[in-house]
């Protein structure tokens, strides 16, 4: 009875709402079952979140490959590390905000040993009505700083499937992906999976005035923002960065030769997150001619509200991103002239 929605008192089943869409959680759960049927070494682990993470599908179809350790996230991660030492590929599915409880185990039990543990964080970013305790506002920061960790986030449901497959095929150590709470975009889906090159971004829209570098669920908002900017005569390039770590440094180098005004966009705190990673990369590459605006969650705890309301409040919706980009473009050009 952890979180009860209305249900039929006879059957115990919660009725589906009319026109209810598919959630990212459902996409992940189904994809993991498909992969488990193909690879006998893959197992799913959660910490009292089988429904919320989508692992309930694995529990129903392949219960022998499903492990729920209860509300004990540190144990879930150490348990996964132990299984990885025996040749299994554990997929640890935990809400972004609750994986924080197991930070020490991620570092000492997985990362130092370079064990192949896959971390899947549901509810990355602002999640809505559960409020400040459930927002996945920190994961890009607290995982990016761990040595050897790979961190990625999909722009849509198809990319989520491919990133999960990529993570399971990866053999060099721990790897993590995060996806948002809520319904999928409804993009065309294909059968099977495709492996994504680690650290490879993709340019979705070319432009010449300003570059919008977005990660995860901020990519669709960035594309919409680019259309709003176009109406005002501003030509924005939009890049789906895919990876927070490692970053696509070749793309950053190439982009900086054409465009010298960037905006990084993330549904994560600015401190130590995706934007910080871009700044670090530009410094490492000795690229000093780019004016970068980091745009993400502010240095405060965000209260409850729908993701749409909250994104609008912190200017991470399309209109807000366009406003931030336009203001940054004006300031950068003004400073260049002066």
Image: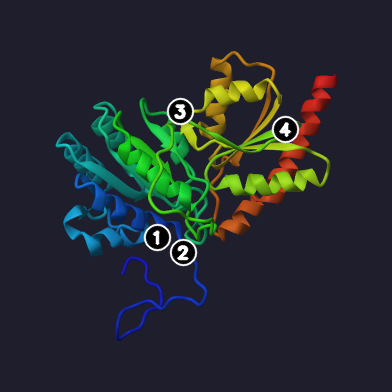
Q: Where does the image place residue 77, in percent across and percent down from the top left?
A: 25, 42
Q: Residues within 10 Å of mark 2 (few under 14, many from 20)?
A: some
The reply, left or right, for residue 228 in relation to residue 23 is right
Task: Compute the Cα span from label 2 to label 4.
Answer: 34 Å
Q: Where is residue 338 drawn, in percent x and y?
A: 85, 19
Task: Tell me if I can see residue 44 in this picture.
Answer: no
Q: Neighbour class for label 4 at 10 Å: few (<14), some, many (≥20)?
A: many
Q: Are marks 4 and 1 in contact (CB under 8 Å)?
A: no
Question: Would you place residue 128 above or below residue 265 in this image?
Answer: below
**Whole-number angstrom distance, CA of label 4 to CA of label 1:** 36 Å
Sequence-earlier tag: 4 or 1:
1
Residue 241 horizontal/vertical position (percent)? 54, 35
Residue at 30% x, 57% y is 55
Q: Is residue 35 above or below residue 284?
A: below
Spatial CA distance of label 3 from label 4 is 23 Å
The residue indicated by pointer 1 is: 26
- Look at the image and tell me whether residue 277 can be seen: yes
Q: Are marks 3 and 4 in contact (CB under 8 Å)?
A: no
Q: What residue is shown with label 3?
A: 246
How many angstroms separate mark 2 from mark 3 (CA)? 30 Å
Label 2 sits on residue? 22
């Amino acid at each position: 009875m952890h979180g009860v929605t209305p249900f039929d008192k006879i059957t115990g089943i919660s009725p589906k709402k009319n026109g209810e869409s598919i959630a990212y959680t459902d996409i992940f759960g189904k994809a993991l079952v498909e992969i488990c049927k193909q690879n006998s070494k893959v197992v799913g682990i959660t910490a009292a979140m089988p429904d919320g993470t989508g692992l309930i599908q694995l529990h129903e179809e392949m219960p022998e490959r499903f492990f729920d350790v209860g509300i004990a996230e540190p144990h879930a991660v150490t348990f996964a590390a132990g299984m990885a030492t025996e040749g299994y590929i554990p997929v640890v599915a935990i809400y972004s905000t609750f994986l924080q409880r197991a930070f020490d185990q991620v570092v000492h039990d997985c990362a130092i040993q370079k064990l192949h543990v896959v971390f899947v964080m549901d509810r990355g970013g602002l999640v809505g009505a559960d409020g400040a305790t459930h927002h996945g506002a920190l994961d890009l920061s607290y995982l990016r700083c761990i040595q050897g960790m790979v961190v990625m986030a999909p722009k849509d449901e198809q990319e989520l499937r491919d990133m999960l497959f990529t993570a399971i095929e990866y053999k060099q150590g721990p790897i993590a992906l995060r996806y948002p709470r809520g319904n999928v975009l409804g993009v065309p889906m294909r059968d099977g999976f495709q492996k994504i090159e680690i650290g490879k971004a993709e340019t979705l829209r070319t432009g010449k005035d300003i570059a919008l570098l977005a990660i995860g669920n901020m990519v669709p908002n960035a594309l919409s923002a680019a259309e709003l900017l176009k109406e005002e005569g501003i030509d924005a390039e939009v890049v789906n960065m895919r990876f927070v770590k490692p970053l696509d440094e070749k793309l950053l180098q190439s982009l900086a030769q054409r465009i010298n005004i960037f905006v990084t966009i993330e549904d994560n705190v600015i401190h130590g997150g995706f934007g910080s990673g871009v700044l670090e990369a530009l410094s490492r590459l000795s690229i000093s001619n780019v004016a970068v605006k980091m745009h993400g969650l502010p240095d405060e705890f965000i209260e409850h509200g729908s993701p749409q309301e909250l994104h609008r409040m912190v200017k991470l919706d399309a209109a807000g991103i366009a406003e931030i980009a336009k203001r940054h473009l004006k300031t950068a050009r003004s400073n260049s002239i002066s």
